Image (cartoon, rainbow, N blue to C red):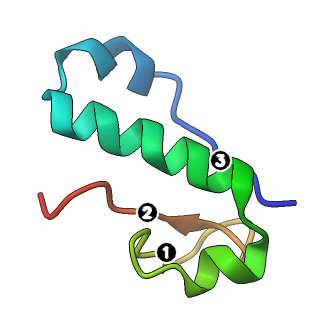
């Protein structure tokens, strides 16, 4: 099952993010709850990207918006 993780410091700054970005985070959280791993990889909206030199080669990052 896919898991979505946030850095501990992320939630300290969440309230200062612009509303469209907060909405994008909430949408990403919902997407992770609803889709399988294969569906997440196929979802063009998440922009799953590999992380170079990650401890776990399955780790990916996602982009919430174009910025």
User: Which residue is nearer to you in this view: 43 or 51?
Assistant: 43
Which residue is the site of mark 2? 62
**CB of mark 2 within 8 Å of CB of mark 1?**
yes
User: Residue at image x 42%, y 82%?
Assistant: 44
Q: Is disc 2 surrounded by few (<14), some (14 to 19) or many (20+) residues within 10 Å?
A: some
- List x then y, in percent, for residue 52: 50, 78
Label 3 crowding class (10 Å Cα cut-off): few <14, some 14-19, many 20+? few
Report whether 49 appears left or right of 5. left
Name the residue that disc number 3 marks. 4
**Residue at the right extreme, as displayed:** 1
Decide which of tag 3 and tag 2 comes sooner along the chain: 3
- Cβ atoms at labels 1 and 3 below 8 Å apart: no
**Residue 48 — which label?**
1
Q: As drawn, is 20 to the left or to the right of 23?
A: left
- Sooner in the amino-acid sequence: mark 1 or mark 3: 3
Q: Where residue 58 sits: x, y (%)?
A: 73, 74
Q: Nearer the viewer, residue 28 or 60?
A: 28
42 or 58: which is nearer to us? 42
């Amino acid at each position: 099952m896919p898991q979505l993780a946030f850095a501990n410091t992320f939630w300290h700054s969440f309230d200062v993010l612009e509303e469209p970005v907060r909405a994008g985070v909430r949408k990403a959280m919902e997407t992770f709850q609803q889709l399988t791993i294969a569906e997440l990889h196929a979802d063009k909206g998440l922009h799953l990207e590999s992380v170079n030199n990650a401890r776990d080669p399955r780790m990916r990052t996602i982009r919430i918006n174009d910025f």
